Image (cartoon, rainbow, N blue to C red):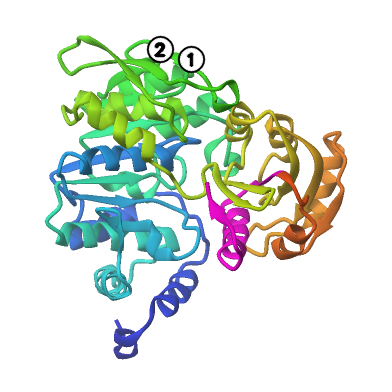
């Protein structure tokens, strides 16, 4: 590390991380493992939980961590991407890492890597793991960034692995079929330890991959499931689910209405049951009913206007939104260049009017490009906007507007919400 780096800010470090590797994504573990060994962070806490999957990773990670904290445990969480600040990726007991601690972790990682080239994500992951290893933690919940098998987070010694769902996404890196993607995602299994899969009717490759690595397979609708799932649009009264205890006993559980996907609730509960870290039913009910995850079905009110933000960026995530509300008055869509616009549009709630917005970021798609794909998919486009600020000025004066399609879409909208007189609901 050079002498001038010792006084760098978080932004300066992040600019540096973006510049030190020739590509943003470089799948593989060899470089990350080598540096992690030097840092001594392959086992960053006594209990290590890995969470991967196409959709629901963030929500499931947040719920697992909240349920652990409710038992008095000190818990670190690593997730990505962030919405407002990089610090959101690293937290301990729901408190974001400070700028000082983040810069310190970057500096230690820089020294440890020496001549090893690391991507932005690899560097950040190692810094987070090192930070956790310095804390008196009881557990860490680590969200896989992309895929699983070759993701930097997969270097850790995990006690249990979770794959929330398996859908077609990130085909350029993971493959074009659900079988290929199942192989990549379920390769976070560990010998002699459970992998909990929340995907109904999971691809054959999911179970085969888990067992080929010596892992123990736990599947939705076999070891756990949802008996009754009623969405808010149908005046939900609650949720009934069942799971398998560590003893093998089937346990039934009734929970109140939640603002998070019920299949993520069931998956998180099953995972904690298998490692005997599930709290009492009363504690579970309290946590589930109050948990809110930024950027996931996040609602705001201003007069007669309701603005809902969701990071949904693939058909599977979009379909969940339709279960929450089948119709919205307006849709503001911003998506990245490698995403399935037609598939997302077919799955999203029906909208009276559709606006597209440009995303000014790596892989960001312009409003015109997104509009062309929306039109090609058979939908009309009422307007195209260069920024979220412009799009929000023409949202209906009453009714529900949904802003979705990417973390970047939610980031742009939420920054503007913070400027206005919106109330969270």
Residue 221: numbered disc: 2
Of 123 and 163, nearer the camera is 163
Residue 251 location, x and y as percent? 25, 12
- The residue that label 1 is drawn on is 201
User: Is residue 276 shown left or right of residue 178?
Assistant: left
Mark earlier in primary sequence (2, 1): 1
Q: Compared to 120, does 328 lie above or below?
A: above
Q: On the image, which quarter does residue 327 sit in? A: top right
Residue 45 location, x and y as percent? 16, 49
The reply to whether callout 2 and callout 1 are in contact (CB within 8 Å) is: yes
User: Is residue 238 shown left or right of residue 210?
Assistant: right
Which residue is pictured at 72% across the width and 40% down the height?
341
Residue 265 location, x and y as percent? 38, 29
Residue 244 visible in the shown view:
yes
Residue span colored magenta = 400-425
Determine whether the residue tagged by mark 1 lies in a helix, strand or loop. loop
């Amino acid at each position: 590390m050079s002498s001038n780096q010792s006084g760098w800010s978080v932004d300066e470090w992040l600019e540096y991380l973006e510049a030190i590797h020739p590509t943003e994504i470089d799948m593989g573990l060899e470089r990350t493992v080598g540096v992690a060994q030097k840092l001594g962070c392959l086992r960053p806490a006594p209990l290590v939980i890995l969470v991967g999957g196409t959709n629901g990773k963030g929500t499931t990670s947040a719920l697992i961590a909240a349920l652990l904290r409710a038992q008095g445990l000190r818990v670190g969480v690593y997730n990505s991407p962030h919405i407002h600040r990089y610090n959101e990726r690293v937290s301990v007991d729901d408190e974001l890492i400070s700028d000082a601690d983040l810069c310190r972790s970057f500096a230690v990682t820089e020294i440890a890597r020496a001549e090893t080239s690391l991507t932005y994500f690899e560097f950040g992951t190692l810094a987070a793991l090192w930070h956790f290893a310095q804390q008196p933690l009881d557990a860490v919940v680590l969200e896989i960034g992309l895929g699983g098998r070759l993701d930097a987070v997969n270097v850790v010694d995990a006690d249990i692995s979770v794959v929330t769902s398996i859908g077609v996404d990130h085909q350029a890196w993971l493959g074009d079929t659900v079988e290929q993607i199942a192989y990549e995602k379920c390769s976070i299994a560990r010998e002699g330890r459970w992998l909990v899969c929340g995907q109904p009717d999971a691809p054959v490759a999911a179970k085969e991959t888990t067992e080929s690595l010596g892992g123990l397979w736990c599947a939705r609708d076999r070891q756990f499931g949802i008996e009754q799932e009623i969405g808010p649009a149908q005046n939900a009264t609650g949720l009934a689910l069942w799971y398998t205890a560590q003893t093998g006993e089937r346990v039934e559980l009734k929970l109140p209405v939640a603002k998070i996907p019920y299949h993520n609730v069931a998956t998180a509960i099953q995972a904690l049951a298998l490692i005997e870290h599930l709290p009492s039913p009363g504690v579970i009910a309290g946590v589930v009913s109050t948990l809110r995850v930024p950027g996931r079905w996040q609602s705001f009110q201003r007069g007669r206007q309701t603005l809902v933000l969701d990071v949904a960026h693939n058909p599977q995530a979009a379909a969940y939104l339709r279960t929450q509300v089948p119709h919205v008055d307006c849709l503001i869509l911003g998506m990245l260049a490698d995403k399935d616009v037609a598939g997302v549009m077919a799955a999203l709630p029906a909208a009276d009017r559709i606006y597209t917005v440009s995303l000014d970021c790596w892989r960001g798609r312009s409003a015109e490009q997104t509009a062309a794909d929306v039109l090609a998919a058979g939908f009309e486009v009422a307007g195209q906007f260069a920024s979220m600020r412009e799009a929000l000025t023409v949202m209906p004066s009453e009714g529900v507007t949904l802003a979705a399609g990417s973390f970047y879409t939610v980031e742009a909208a939420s920054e503007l919400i913070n400027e206005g007189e919106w109330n969270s609901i």
